[in-house]
Image: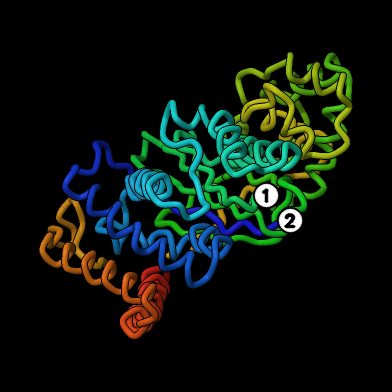
Amino acid sequence: MQRSGFATLRLHYGSAPPWLFSRMVSLGGGVMEVLVDEYGRHAVLSRLADTFFFQSLSNALGFDWNSSGSTTVLCGVLQQVFEKQNLGIKVAGGKGSKSRQTQEDLEKIGDGFSIGEKKVLEIKHASRMTAKVDTAAIQADYQLYHHCMIVSEEGDWTVVQQGMNPEIKAARRYHWLCSDVDGFAEKPGHVIVGDKVHDSVLDLTATESKACRRIVTDLAAEKTDRIRRLFDSITLAEQRTLQDWDRKTGDYRIPKRMDWNAVERAYELQPENFERVLSIEGMGPATVRGLALIAQLVYGEPPSWKDPVKYSFAFGGKDGVPYPVDRKCYDEAISALENAVRQAKLGKKDELDALKRLNITKDRTYRALAVSQSSS
């Protein structure tokens, strides 16, 4: 499975001003048209699944690098771009209530692109599981409020979703790419871009959590009464199990309640692997956490508790950081790109080739900045 990672961003409220959003759609439309023409649709999805490219594109279109809005606004821009232009790519879902319409949107996209029923079901499953993994299997106190699935007419997809932590006023973005997806329960490696490392982050998708996942799967197949007894045993402060393992209950925050209906459903379904456990209705963060803690404190198979973290503007940012958006310069860039696209369609690709060389230079600059900031 190729999963590019997630980014931590400052949580900002409000919306992009209309004058900026309309320009973002215009410039973004030109960029997407060039990318599809030059590299194809899957390459576009691959780039949007790259945290560096996604953030750089947001910067280039005029949004602040450290703002949660860079995710929601850029996805909104892309949704309009792909609605207006016939590029063979559409966006499902969105922010808040729109995220809950993703399954419906995917049905419509499947019909519009004539994607087969089996493939549509696979895409819908991927949408559910990516959300489930980033809320229940990975727990860093970020609640998902934005979920976008970008789908091509070939049935390829990228997921960009975001969670918020109001207490520390931060947001965290998660990226997924469909290429070579063998499952959603374990990742072969990923990149996390952020400015804060959290303590005691439950990560059941980590390689180090393999044995814990196996125990959780076995527990899910047990009778509910037995799971209740095990859960009660780890909630008692005087329980010798906690003393033997030299763990403080506060470190891992034993959940106050479990969804016992979900535990009962798991017993009835007898899940064969951890991915199947996650897919069970009601198997949310608290219940998954409870099973993982039983696996650690009773059976001695701990999950990973590490938060795996690492970490420019073209026209300025909407908040005036590092400087206000230069509207004249922005409009000139839109005009230059649109003209290059028109000339390329007429067989005159000199301008487009020049822009591509400029893009390579910018890409190197963004990555150099990212490396320098991560080490500072």
Question: Image point 19% across, 42% down: which residue?
Answer: 18
Q: In which quarter of the image is the N terminus?
A: bottom right
Reading the image, the residue beneath label 1 is 304
* 286, above or below 194, in the image: above
Q: Where is residue 63 in the image (x, y as percent from the top left)?
A: 27, 55
Q: Which of marks 2 and 1 is nearer the N terminus?
A: 2
Amino acid at the residue labelled 2: Thr
In the drawing, does residue 123 fall left or right of residue 351? Answer: right
Examine the image and state in which quarter residue 11 appears.
top left
Describe the element under mark 1 as helix, strand or loop.
Answer: loop
- Give the camera-side residue of 232 and 332: 332
Reading the image, the residue beneath label 2 is 207
Q: Position of residue 43 (x, y in %)?
A: 55, 65
> Which label lies toward us, 2 or 1?
2
Residue neighbourhood size for the residue with mark 2, other residues' Cα within 10 Å, grouped as few (<14), some (14–19), many (≥20): some
Question: Image point 41% across, 62% down: which residue?
Answer: 33
